[in-house]
Image (cartoon, rainbow, N blue to C red):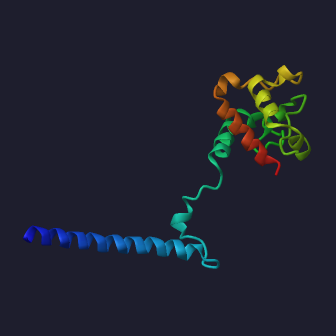
Amino acid sequence: MEKYRLIKDCFTAYSFVFIIVFAFFISQQVAYSKPGHGEPPEHAQRFKVKEPFEIRNGKVIYLEHCAPCHGDTGKGDGKYYASGLEPRPRDFTNPGFMNQTKDEYLIEVIRKGTAAFGKSSYCPPWGATLKEDEKIKNVVAFLRTLYK
């Protein structure tokens, strides 16, 4: 009989703790979902993801492989542009070009290089370097953020 009373007391204690934790969690969700109650605390904000992974990953790849010529902001003014590249590297901030250009075309140009499309031989084929199509697609996703 004593064994059952002990089990009942433990069950009651665990149930009470669960209800308290659950109530706290719900109250936090309700408090931050109401309009005018501000943002979550600062320690919670630093874990917010501001950009999807594809864009963040594309930016890292772009900065490593493309930015030397196209520039950090994609304006075609990278550090090698100063050495007089002709033709000038593509300006990815130009909405006229970017709105008319399909992702598939950008993917192929990155994969095969610009010489394969009758353009400058300065931009090499990155397909062998990046190897995974997903990496190239991530670069294109990042490029799409530069002109908006």
Q: Residue at x 76, y 31 (%)?
A: 107
Position of residue 141 measured from the top left corner of the image (x, y, whole percent): 73, 42
Give the quarter of the figure containing the N terminus: bottom left
Q: Residue at x 56, y 70 (%)?
A: 40
Q: Residue at x 76, y 48 (%)?
A: 145
Position of residue 95 measured from the top left corner of the image (x, y, whole percent): 88, 46
**Number of marks drawn:** 0
Q: Going by the picture, which residue comes out furthest to the bottom?
A: 36
Q: Going by the picture, which residue comes out furthest to the left?
A: 1
Position of residue 25 measured from the top left corner of the image (x, y, whole percent): 45, 70
Identify the image quadrant of residue 101.
top right
* Most foreground residue, 122 or 105: 105
Position of residue 70 measured from the top left corner of the image (x, y, whole percent): 80, 37
Tell me if I can see residue 80 in this picture.
no
* Most foreground residue, 47 or 90: 47
* Most foreground residue, 34 or 52: 34
34 left or right of 2? right
Can you say whether 21 is above or below 48 in the image?
below
92 left or right of 8? right
17 left or right of 89? left
Q: Residue at x 80, y 28 (%)?
A: 109
Can you say whether 3 is above or below 95 in the image?
below
Tell me if I can see residue 148 in this picture.
yes
139 left or right of 96? left
Can you say whether 27 is above or below 64 in the image?
below
* Most foreground residue, 16 or 70: 16
